Image (cartoon, grey):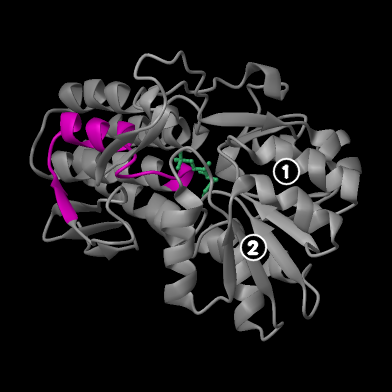
Amino acid sequence: MQNLTALSLKTEQGKLQVLDQTLLPHRQQWLNCATVAEMVGMIKKLQLRGAPAIGIGACLLLAVRAEQGVSREQLRQDAEILRAARPTAVNLMNNIDSMLKALSEPDYANAAVACAEALFFEDVALCQQMAGHGAALVQPDEQLLTHCNTGGLATAGVGTALGVINLAHQQGKNIRLWVDETRPLLQGGRLTAWECQQLGIPYQLICDNMAAMLMARGQVDRIFVGADRIAANGDFANKVGTYSLAVLAQYHQVPFYVVAPHTTVDLNCPDGSVIPIEQRDGNEVRGVSGGFGQSIWAPEDAPVFNPAFDVTPASLVTGWVLDTGVYSKADIASGVLKQFA
Ligand code: MRU
């Protein structure tokens, strides 16, 4: 297996390591990941997170184990356990399906390694293509806004929405970025802010409930968000809070774009109502939790509703920035996503 390096994943001499994203931005600690139980635990705890990154991480582990001589039957069982680690991001399921095909090859171990490597490099290329298409939309001096973390930490490459924003920045467009902190797990405040600092993107962190005021003041020109699953009609699931941003954007006439690779499209979902939405532990809402321990401020037994994602209807989207181009509502309505069957 080749040595591969991404911001949150790396393979070295046939071993897989995962950057513990729950400890960011204060500590950069790489964790060894050798077993399926370890990988499932890391994905569930969001030590490894982001739709493309969890799919690629799971496949890299299968490839590492295949190279170590684990049997085809065991790897098939492992694949099914990994597939169920988180329910919303379809990249995980799609990537696992690719690995299962590779595991059917006569030389299944080499096929699994080649497949995982190909998925890794494919994602790097898809990120670059999305960045090019999305950055072309950005005009000089714009103030952009994003939600959650969609950068290098969430993919094998430069990211989805944050990849677009970073390229616009690199192109010298003099953009400024509003970063939603993204309650409850603060992916914006902890991870996107950290990535922006590394990349030199001028940004300001805001609480999620400040976006409305900025839009009312005309201080948001364009919004870019990622997606965990895009249904056939263009509805999409992304980090909870994305839907409210889209509603605000429509009210204030701010262009609202979703940026995702075609591997995030799920034609088995006719619309967003059937996308499975992960429900998470109540303590994430009762206080803050993560690698730095937990602080609870609500009553300890406060009943909690904690969906990790929400669904934004296609009617609120200005454009779908995929690796193959930017699609309008009319393109989506005419069935352009069917090319990804
Ligand atoms: O729960 P997370 O942190 O895995 O959620 C991540 C998101 O919602 C991202 O916006 C999405 O995966 C697209 S990022 C490439």
Q: Secondary structure at mark 2?
A: strand
Disc 1 marks a residue whose amino acid type is Leu
Residue ID at (51%, 63%): 125
The residue wearing badge 1 is: 245
- Which residue in the structure is indicated by mark 2? 178
Is residue 86 rendered to the left or right of residue 243? left
Q: Quadrant of the C terminus?
A: top right
Comparing 40 with 69, the one in front is: 40
x and y, in percent, of residue 301 in the image: 37, 14
Helix, strand or loop for disc 1: helix
Whether 15 is drawn above or below 243: the answer is below
In the picture, residue 9 is in which quadrant? bottom left
User: Residue 267 magenta-drawn?
Assistant: no
Residue at 19% across, 41% down: 109
Is residue 115 left or right of 17 when viewed as pictured?
A: right
Q: Position of residue 222 (x, y in %)?
A: 78, 60
Farthest-out residue, bottom: 172
Q: Which residues are magenta?
A: 30-52
Note whether 12 is above or below 186 in the view shown.
below
Closer to the camera in the image, 296 or 158: 296
Residue 64 lies, with reference to residue 41, above or below; the image says below
Nearer-the-camera pick, 337 or 282: 282
Q: Amino acid at mark 2?
A: Trp
The answer to which of 88 and 72 lies nearer the viewer is 88
State the image coordinates of residue 70 (x, y, percent, origin top left): 10, 33
Answer whether labels 1 and 2 touch (C-beta < 8 Å).
no
Query: How many discs mark residues in the rendered view?
Result: 2
The residue lying at 55 percent from left, 42 percent from top is 263
Marks 1/2: CA–CA distance: 12 Å
**Quarter placement of the N terminus:** bottom left
Task: Compare marks 1 and 2 and give the one earlier in the sequence.
Answer: 2
